[in-house]
Image: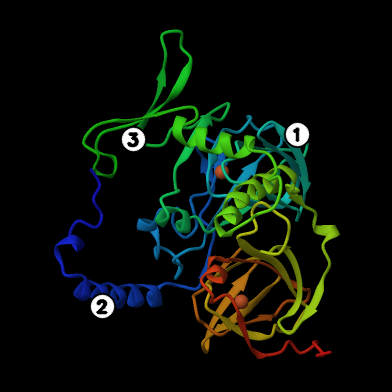
């Protein structure tokens, strides 16, 4: 079986700590900060891009960009496309509609979204996206899933394949005696596995039981009498949030704010009543020829260029970008965006906010945006 850290286990901890951190640092600093998108291709789910800076697996970090945590992928649902596959995982995704409009089914409920709206899916919710029949849609999914991997929560379940699935190289479909598709087989040899692995569609019983029990628990009744009670209540509060929180954040309903960093519109942050609030996701608009403030934070940051062109300065180094590019800002890097086009630049910025829970989520402002006047 795959044992990516087998060599590391033979070496004393106090040695490997310094060897690996030095290696990681030099690998991270060798990677580009602006990436062109990896193209979409047909998959078992539909038309999807690979993860742009590596899959959620921790083994896949520091591959294309200098990011440990953040990655992202793109999904396209063409007009009249085959119905997409259905799946579920504990990590709660946020899906941003880049173009067109569509629908999302979460545990049987349907939600509608349009261009620049954001969809949030609560943890362990069966989800499926669809596009408008006439115009379809393109979805961008910024993700911090490696946090889930190191917490042992990476498990994902395939419930249904796309109406017209494409099986990747090294796999083959599994049918029952009546010709019904049951799942697919990953063949011996892929990633060094010594026997075939069967991916059978449907829920995994233990995880299913845990989450069904949480959802069925109902609201907490009475007072929380002691510290332990607070955590008993927390499970009920979390279930209430999943039941009641909106799944769609409408772009036109959220306000623009003038801040020291520039003109921002928040779509997700930890104080919003959303089941996927463990991220910051916000628009940053920079008018033609202008610049953002300059700031620094411990969190790494991923920005998709929605409109315009320009460049970033990261700790003194210049990185050019244009529409469609992904800007990867490493942890603890002073950064500033400059717009060069004849119209506005618009970025969609995303950061994992696990940093906030570690007590290092604050932002240090080094220079204010030129249009900003402090109150
Ligand atoms: Fe998903
Ligand atoms: Fe930033």
SS for callout 1:
loop
**Residue drawn 53% across and 63% down?**
36
Task: State which tag comes first along the sequence, 1 or 2.
Answer: 2
Quadrant hosting residue 216: top right
State the residue position of label 2: 18
State the residue position of label 1: 133
Across and down, in percent, residue 244 comes to 75, 45
Quadrant the C terminus occupies: bottom right
Evaluate whether residue 307 shows in this view: no
Can you name the residue that lies furthest to the top here?
178
Across and down, in percent, residue 227 comes to 57, 60
**Residue drawn 68% across and 39% down?**
218
Across and down, in percent, residue 162 comes to 56, 30
Quadrant hosting residue 219: top right
SS for callout 3:
loop
Task: State which tag comes first along the sequence, 3 or 2.
Answer: 2
State the residue position of label 3: 170
Disc assigned to residue 306: none
Task: State which tag comes first along the sequence, 1 or 3.
Answer: 1
Ligand 1 in which quarter: top right
């Amino acid at each position: 079986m795959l044992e990516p850290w087998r060599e590391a286990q033979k070496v004393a901890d106090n040695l490997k700590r310094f060897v690996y951190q030095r290696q990681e640092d030099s690998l991270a600093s060798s990677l580009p900060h602006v990436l062109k998108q990896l193209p979409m291709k047909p998959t078992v789910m539909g038309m999807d891009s690979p993860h742009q800076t590596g899959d959620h697996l921790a083994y896949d970090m520091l591959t294309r960009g200098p990011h440990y945590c953040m990655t992202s992928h793109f999904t396209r649902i063409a007009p009249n496309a085959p119905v997409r596959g259905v799946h579920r995982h504990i990590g709660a995704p946020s899906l941003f509609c880049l173009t067109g409009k569509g629908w999302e089914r979460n545990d049987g409920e349907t939600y509608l979204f349009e261009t620049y709206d954001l969809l949030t899916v609560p943890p362990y919710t069966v989800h499926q996206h669809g596009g408008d029949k006439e115009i379809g849609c393109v979805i961008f999914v910024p993700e911090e899933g490696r946090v889930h991997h190191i917490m042992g929560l990476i498990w994902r379940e395939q419930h249904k394949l796309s109406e017209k699935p494409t099986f990747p190289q090294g796999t083959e479909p599994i049918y029952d005696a009546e010709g019904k598709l049951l799942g697919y087989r990953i063949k011996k040899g892929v990633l060094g596995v010594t026997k075939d692995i069967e991916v059978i569609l449907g829920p995994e019983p233990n995880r299913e039981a845990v989450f069904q029990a949480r959802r069925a628990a109902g609201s907490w009744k009475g007072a929380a009498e002691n510290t332990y009670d607070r955590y008993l209540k927390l499970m009920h509060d979390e279930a209430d949030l999943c039941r009641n929180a909106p799944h769609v954040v409408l772009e036109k309903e959220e306000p623009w704010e003038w801040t020291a960093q520039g003109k921002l519109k928040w779509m997700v942050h930890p104080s919003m009543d959303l089941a996927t609030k463990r991220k910051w996701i916000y628009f940053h608009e920079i008018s033609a020829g202008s610049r953002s403030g300059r700031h620094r934070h411990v969190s790494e940051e991923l920005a998709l260029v929605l409109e315009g062109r320009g460049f970033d300065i990261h700790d003194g180094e210049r990185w050019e970008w244009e529409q469609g590019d992904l800007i990867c800002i490493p942890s603890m890097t002073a950064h500033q965006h400059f717009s060069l086009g004849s119209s506005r630049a618009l970025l969609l910025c995303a950061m994992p906010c696990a940093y906030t829970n570690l007590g290092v989520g604050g932002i240090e402002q080094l220079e204010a945006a030129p249009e900003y006047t402090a109150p």
